[in-house]
Image: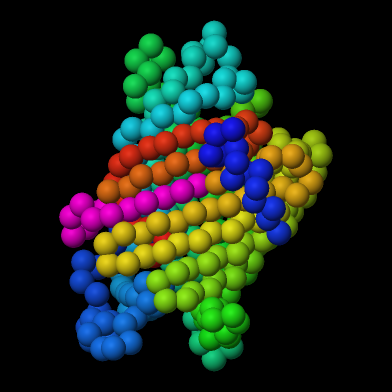
Amino acid sequence: MDPGDFILRQWLSPGLLLVGSLLPAIVIAQEKTDNPVSPLDKRLRIEQDTRYQPFVLTPHKPNYLLPLTYNSKPNQTPFDPQQDGVIEEPEVKFQISIKMPLTDEIFDDRITLYAAYTNQSYWQAFNDDNSQPFREANHEPELFATMQNDWQIFGFTNKLNILGLSHQSNGQSGSKSRSWNRVYARFIFERGNFYLDFKPWYRVQTAEQFDDNPDIEHYLGNGELRMAYANQRHTVSLMLRNNLDADNRGALELNWSFPMSRRAKWFIQYFDGYGESLIDYNARVKRIGIGIALTDWL
């Protein structure tokens, strides 16, 4: 049994540009004290200081480019070999994710309303026999509200709670069309350099005649757990997702970033499981990739 199989079976369950090359002065000052600022607090304060600057795009999810990834078993099922060609193992993968605050004048400035957009794309750049097509592009607009908090439990501080609405689609038609809508919550905790993000969701049902993937919940389940650790040079994150109603239909994603330059980091990603992309929601993917990240989770 390989490591991916082991973790999937053993887990029982339950962002485009850097906002600045220098940290705000207040953060730097606090880092020099005996009580350094946590990685999550750094990010929240930078976002707070820059969110209404007109020439700043605030990262949402990680922004990265993996010029070389390898998927050991590409999912050919949705594609017609005669029309679409054969899907090859090497591929370029990238993600662009940004958010913008709409208003923070809710309940005495305690709640901020955001709009966000994430694009995750898969490019068969090495597939010369098939005209190097973009195999898949997933689009995810979101609307969500955030509320900062300071509740503590078991040594962890609940720093942020989020309630949102997400639409995700691959923009295709016919047999390749995939889409779904979700209402989700996120409960974000920290303890020193450690970050914990629990994200349950509820699928908003689509009329049967318009549902391109009625069984998507059997593969992506009803939530995911993400953990991250960051120090001065390295950030490591792990995402776990499992469906308690199905056998081994979960996923794990392991990310590692470390310095390359002042504006970018080396980035390594490993994914094993279901739901990496919408077109592959019901096919198991094992992919490893290397590239650069402009922003990470922390």
Q: Residue furthest toward the right? A: 208
* Front in this rendered view, residue 2 or 116: 2
Whether 78 is drawn above or below 280: the answer is above
Residue range in magenta is 253-265
> Residue 176, position in %: x, y?
61, 28
* Front in this rendered view, residue 276 or 271: 271
> Residue 25, position in %: x, y?
22, 83
Q: Main secondary structure of the magenta part?
A: strand
Q: Residue furthest toward the left? A: 261
Whether 173 is drawn above or below 158: the answer is above
Residue 88 included in the magenta stretch of the image? no
Which quadrant is the N terminus positioned in?
top right
Q: Residue at x 66, y 43 (%)?
A: 9
On screen, residue 159 versus residue 62, left or right, reads: right
| Residue 120 appears in the figure | yes
User: Residue 47 appears in which quarter of the rendering?
Assistant: bottom left
Which quadrant is the C terminus positioned in?
bottom left
Q: Residue at x 80, y 36 (%)?
A: 209
User: Residue 94 appears in which quarter of the rendering?
Assistant: top left
Residue 258 included in the magenta stretch of the image? yes
> Residue 178, position in %: x, y?
63, 37
| Residue 149 appears in the figure | no
Q: Residue furthest toward the top? A: 82
Q: Residue at x 45, y 41 (%)?
A: 270
* Front in this rendered view, residue 135 or 152: 152
Whether 70 is drawn above or below 81: the answer is below
> Residue 162, position in %: x, y?
58, 71
